[in-house]
């Protein structure tokens, strides 16, 4: 099997992550209402605004297993890390995990960043190469996704990684 990308292009220095430079942002009210369909199609709204597992949805849409390429797992301590303010609710020290989500055949589908309480990350991510939903399902643990915001913006690193011109959609919960 030939991958559609070279894993070496996925390396990210441990002091940064691929945040969007927003052109537009929506808060919890927008998340609850949804967006006009000419702004974001219904299928994309289910993926971006739904409280289900995006990796599971990608698997259903592509009919291939969703796999994870871990880019970086870095201890960020109590640093705000240029993350959404909500991240400060996670007790420190914190660990930041960055991954590419891709199909089993190698098509890169998404980029995801998550922050974890460093003292407990190994309890939940026993196999760090699995998508989060797969790890939690094995433990019979659910992750509640309270989607708090959505944004639309640019990120040169994501443009390069996907080989597509932005802007891109992002969310935080």
Image: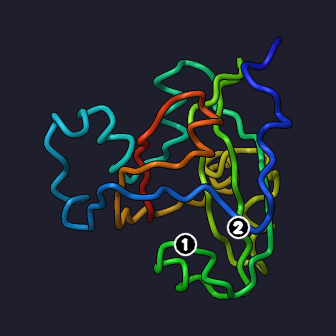
Residue on which disc 1 sits: 83
Residue 13, given in percent of the width and then of the height, sits at 80, 59
Q: Where, quadrant-wise, is the C terminus in this rendering?
A: bottom left
Q: Nearer the viewer, mark 2 or mark 1?
A: 1
Give the residue drawn at x 53%, y 37%.
Answer: 56
Q: Nearer the viewer, residue 148 or 23?
A: 23
Relative side of 80 to 172, left or right: right
Q: Nearer the viewer, residue 128 or 134?
A: 128
The reply to whether dot 2 and dot 1 touch (C-beta < 8 Å) is yes
Q: CA distance from mark 2 to mark 1?
A: 10 Å
Residue on which disc 2 sits: 96
- Categorize mark 2 by other alpha carbons within 10 Å: few (<14), some (14-19), many (20+): many
Q: Which numbered disc covers residue 151?
A: none
State the SS at label 2: strand
On screen, residue 80 above or below 12: below
State the SS at label 1: loop
Give the residue drawn at x 59%, y 42%.
Answer: 158
Q: Nearer the viewer, residue 99 or 8?
A: 8
- Categorize mark 1 by other alpha carbons within 10 Å: few (<14), some (14-19), many (20+): some
Relative side of 95 to 52, left or right: right
Quarter-wise, where is residue 72 in the image?
bottom right
Residue 47, given in percent of the width and then of the height, sits at 38, 41
- In the rendered image, the residue lying farthest to the right is 8
Residue 59, given in percent of the width and then of the height, sits at 55, 28
On screen, residue 34 above or below 65: below
Give the residue drawn at x 81%, y 57%.
Answer: 126
Quarter-wise, where is residue 30 in the image?
bottom left
Relative side of 105 to 163, left or right: right
Q: Nearer the viewer, residue 160 or 170?
A: 160
Q: Where, quadrant-wise, is the N terminus in this rendering?
A: top right
Mark with earlier residue (2, 1): 1
Residue 160, given in percent of the width and then of the height, sits at 63, 36
């Amino acid at each position: 099997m030939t991958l559609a990308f070279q894993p070496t292009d996925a390396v990210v220095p441990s002091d940064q992550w691929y945040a969007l430079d927003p052109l537009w942002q929506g808060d919890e009210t927008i998340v609850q209402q949804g967006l006009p369909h000419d702004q974001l199609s219904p299928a994309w709204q289910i993926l971006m605004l739904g409280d289900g597992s995006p990796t599971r949805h990608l698997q259903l849409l592509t009919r291939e297993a969703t796999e994870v390429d871990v880019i970086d797992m870095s201890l960020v301590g109590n640093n705000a890390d240029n993350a959404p303010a909500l991240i400060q609710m996670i007790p420190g020290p914190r660990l930041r995990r960055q991954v590419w989500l891709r199909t089993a055949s190698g098509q890169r589908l998404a980029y995801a960043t998550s922050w974890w309480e460093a003292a407990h990350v190994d309890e939940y991510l026993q196999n760090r190469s699995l998508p989060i939903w797969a790890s939690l399902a094995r433990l019979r643990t659910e992750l509640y996704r309270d989607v708090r915001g959505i944004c639309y913006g640019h990120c040169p690193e994501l443009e390069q990684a996907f080989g597509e011109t932005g802007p891109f959609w992002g969310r935080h919960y």
